[in-house]
Image (spheres, rainbow, N blue to C red):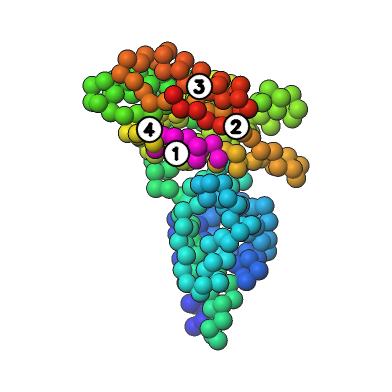
Amino acid sequence: MKKAIKKYYETAAENTIDGIYFVDRKRKILYWNKAAEEITGYKKEEIINKRCFDNILRHVDENGTLLCLTKCPLVRAMEKGEIVSENVYLHDKNGARIPVNVETIPVRNRKGEIVGAVERFNQGWGLPLIRENIQKLQKDAFIDQLTQIPNRRYLEIKIDEAIKEVNLLNKSHGFLFIDIDDFKKLNDTYGHLIGDRVLRAIAQTILSNIKPHDIVGRYGGEEFTVILKDIDEENLKKFTNTLRILINNSSIDIDGRELSITTSIGCTLIRKDDTIQSLIARADALMYEVKKSGKNNCKFG
């Protein structure tokens, strides 16, 4: 009977859309389900018997605080003996920062002693919809083949639409111009294959942290632009800085070494008198001001 019950719970865990893993008191991972593999990119064989803070998920909050080095939700659940829920950002195998909601549940033995914990996590609800929309663009040659996000051609169409919405519907939309710091040096030092991995990681970090009706695309080279719908100045500034922090806390593995990246970002609200050219020029100029003042920052204007 016990074996049948155990098998039932294992089957249920393997067929849920949520990532699920179990840890002991020392946070050694004892179980890792299929959804956890799909969300993070890490296979079960790479994870079992490792500790969750062994350079794997490396959860951070929106301020970039490394939760594995402080008290992560798993630790707090085991210390408090109660369920802990939190929104955090995990680090996937490809180097992107993915927003997830985690719920950690303490596990007790028959004596009532806490012997470990279970963590359930899932992606932001909008990400599957965003990826579905991007797949629909493939056939119209609107996708950048390297990063698998919209290309410059599609971006310019959507920028024009956003300007019209600001004028005709009195909407408030934001615009970001993002440039990777010292990307030429990175390519010269590590080669273009590593540079490509960096571009893909940053593209996925941005894509994973915008809303379904927002637009991100690769404008050219190491430049990305983002259209943020229905956002005011305060929230635009907050989102831009959070995105910068998440990119800073993303990294790719090069033979056991972690390569981190920073960006300079210009952000602005779309104005009624904007054209595609004037909007891009203004955000680009703001980005260059960041470059001149030391990089790794964002500027609104």
Residue at image coords 28%, 28%: 171
Q: Name the residue under label 4.
A: 233
Q: In this view, does 161 lie above or below 208?
A: above
Sequence order check: which comes first, mark 1 or mark 2?
1
Q: In which quarter of the image is residue 277?
A: top left
Residue 55, horizontal then vertical, whole percent: 67, 52
The residues tagged by marks 3 and 4 sit, at their Cα atoms, a distance apart of 15 Å
Residue type at mark 1 is Lys
- The disc label shown at residue 296, or none: 2
Q: Of 109 and 175, which appears nearest the observer?
A: 175
Residue 30, horizontal then vertical, whole percent: 62, 67
Sequence order check: which comes first, mark 3 or mark 2?
3
The stretch in magenta equals: 235-245
How crowded is the residue under tag 4: few (<14 C-alpha within 10 Å), some, or many (20+)? some
Quadrant housing the C terminus: top left
Residue lying farthest to the front in this orientation: 293
Decide if residue 187 is in sight here: no
- The disc label shown at residue 238, or none: 1
Q: Is residue 61 magenta?
A: no
Q: Is residue 236 magenta?
A: yes
- The disc label shown at residue 286, or none: 3
Residue at image coords 37%, 14%: 275
Q: In this view, does 122 lie above or below 180?
A: below
Q: Is mark 4 on a helix, strand or loop?
A: helix
- The disc label shown at residue 2, or none: none
Residue at image coords 34%, 20%: 271
Residue at image coords 68%, 64%: 49
Sequence order check: which comes first, mark 1 or mark 4?
4
Q: Is mark 3 on a helix, strand or loop?
A: helix
Q: In which quarter of the image is residue 108?
A: bottom right
Q: What element carries label 1?
A: helix
Q: Is mark 2 on a helix, strand or loop?
A: loop
